[in-house]
Amino acid sequence: MKHAPMHDDFSYQAFDALYESHFANRIALPRVRHVNIETHIAEIKNWSWVQVEEVGQSFSDRSIYLVTVGSGNTSLFAWSQMHGDESTATASIFDFLFMLNALPENERKACLDEVTFHFLPMLNPDGAEVNTRYNAQGIDINRDARNLQSPEGRLLHSLLNRFSPDYAFNLHDQSPYYGAGKRGKPAILSFLAPPMDAGRQCPPHRERAMALISHYVNRLTNLIPECMGRYDDTYSPIAFGDYATQSGASCILIESGAHDTSDKRELARRLNVWLLFQTLKWVNNTSTQYSTRAYLNLPQNAEDHMTDLLIKGVKVKAGSKMFSLDMAIDFQRHNTGCIRELGDLGDLAGFITIQASELAYQTGQVFNVVEPFTLSDSVYFSFLLRGVLFFHDPENVMEIQTCLPVLTLSQLNKDNNLPKRHKKQVNFLLCDECTVRYVVLHGRPYSLQESITPLFV
Ligand SMILES: [Zn+2]
C-alpha cells in the first residue's frame, strides 16, 4: 500500500480509493453466511501475524471464530452479527484484516503496537444461515445477557470476562428507515455508549466511550453530514452492550444503516473499516483530548422517519369526489411494496420523493391478450403510456422479454381507485392532464419520460 493507514495524511479519500480498488468486493453484501466467512478464516489462518481460535459453537454446532491481532497493552474486543441478518460489520471486520495484511510488516506493527484487538465476526452463524435476527433456539442473543440460555450468549459473556477489554465494540445493522433526527436524512451510522445502570451514570470508562464516538463523529461529519444519530440510552440489563459497560469496558454500539434504497449498506460498511483505523490512531495517540460533545450533540435516532418512496399531494378521485394526500411506500422491507401511511406526511422523508400535486393516482387498465406478441421494454412502455398496467393472458401467448415486473389480472387493485394503508402489492400510475408520467411497480417508481426509467438504485 502506498499510504500507510497510520500516516497523518491518510485521508478518507486515499483510504476510499485504496479500499475501492483492492478490498471492496471480497465479500458480497447484503448477506454474509457462515460458509462465506469460513473461506476467509481458512485464508487468515495462514497469516503469521494473526491468531485464529475456534472459540465456541452455536446451538446448531457451527464454529464460532475469534481472530486476535497485536499484543499491546490496550485490549479491544469487537463482535458482529449477533443478529444473524445483520451482516455489514462482519464484512467490515474482514475488510479491515485484509487491509492490515496488505501493509508492509513494519507499518502493520506500528498500527498494532499499542493494542491487542480481538475480533469475533459472526456470533450468530445459525441465524445468519437462515437470515434471521434470532439464534436456532429462537432467542435474541442481545436479550440474553442476564439469562444466558443461548450458547452464543454464554460465549460472549465468557469472552468479555476473559478479556476484560478496555474497549468493546458491539456491531449491528439498523432498519433502513431510521432518520438521523427528523431532518429528512437517513441515519447511515448510529452510535450509543450504553449505560451501566438505570441512573445512566457516566463513570470515566463510559465517558471515554462517548469521547471515542465524538472522535468518530468529528472525522465523519464532512463525509456524511447530518446522517449520524444517537440511540436512546435507557438501561437494559438484558442487553450485552449494557453488560459490557457494567463490567468496566468503554463500550460502543455502532449501527450500520442505509444511505439509499439499495440497502446493501456498502457505505456504512466502508465507514466501519475507516472507523477501525481511526480507533487504532485513537489508542496510539495518548495525547488525544477527551470531549464528549460531538456525541452528546448527535440527534436522537428517529424510528421510521424515512420511507422508500414519498409521494406528496397526489390527487385521488373516487367517483365524483376528489381529495389529495401524501403516500409513504416501503419496498426495502416488503418486496412487492407496502403502503405504510397515507395523509399529511410532513414528518416523513423519502429516499425518493415525487412532488405530485399536479398528478392523479390511477389504478391502471387491463389488457386482454388475444393473440401472441412479445412484451419488450419498448412495447411495455407504450402500454403504460396508454394506461395499461395489467395483462390478462389466459392462453399464455404473451412472450415476456422485460426484466420489469409484469402484472397479471390477479394483482388488479379492487379498492375503487383508492390507495389503501398497509396494502401490499403496490402498483399504480401517476398521470397529469394528458400523459402517464410515472408508474409504480411493486412499490418502486419509474419515470415514463422517454422510456421506463427507474428512480431507485
Ligand atoms: Zn442488531
Image (cartoon, helix red, strand yellow):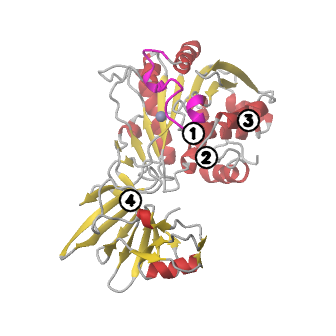
Q: Residues within 10 Å of mark 3 (few under 14, many from 20)?
A: some
Residue that appears at 37% across and 58% down = 329
Q: CA distance from mark 2 to mark 1?
A: 7 Å
Q: Residues within 10 Å of mark 2 (few under 14, many from 20)?
A: some
Residue 29 is marked as: 2
Residue 350 is marked as: 4
Q: CA distance from mark 2 to mark 4?
A: 23 Å
- In the displayed structure, does residue 431 sit left or right of residue 65? left
Dot 1 and dot 3 residues touching (CB under 8 Å): no
- Which residue is outermost to the left? 321
Rendering quarter of residue 41: top right
> What range of the chain is rendered magenta?
126-149
Label 1: which residue? Answer: 87
Residue that appears at 46% across and 29% down = 209
The secondary structure that most of the magenta stretch takes on is loop
- Image coords of residue 433 (percent x, y): 32, 85
Element at badge 3? helix
Element at badge 1? loop
Q: CA distance from mark 3 to mark 2?
A: 15 Å
The three-letter amino acid code for the residue at tag 4 is: Gly
Rendering quarter of residue 360: bottom left
Q: Residues within 10 Å of mark 1 (few under 14, many from 20)?
A: many
Dot 2 and dot 4 residues touching (CB under 8 Å): no
Element at badge 2? loop
Label 3: which residue? Answer: 40
- Image coords of residue 296 (percent x, y): 36, 37
- In the displayed structure, does residue 432 sit left or right of residue 36? left
Dot 4 and dot 3 residues touching (CB under 8 Å): no
Of 258 and 115, the residue lying toward us:
258
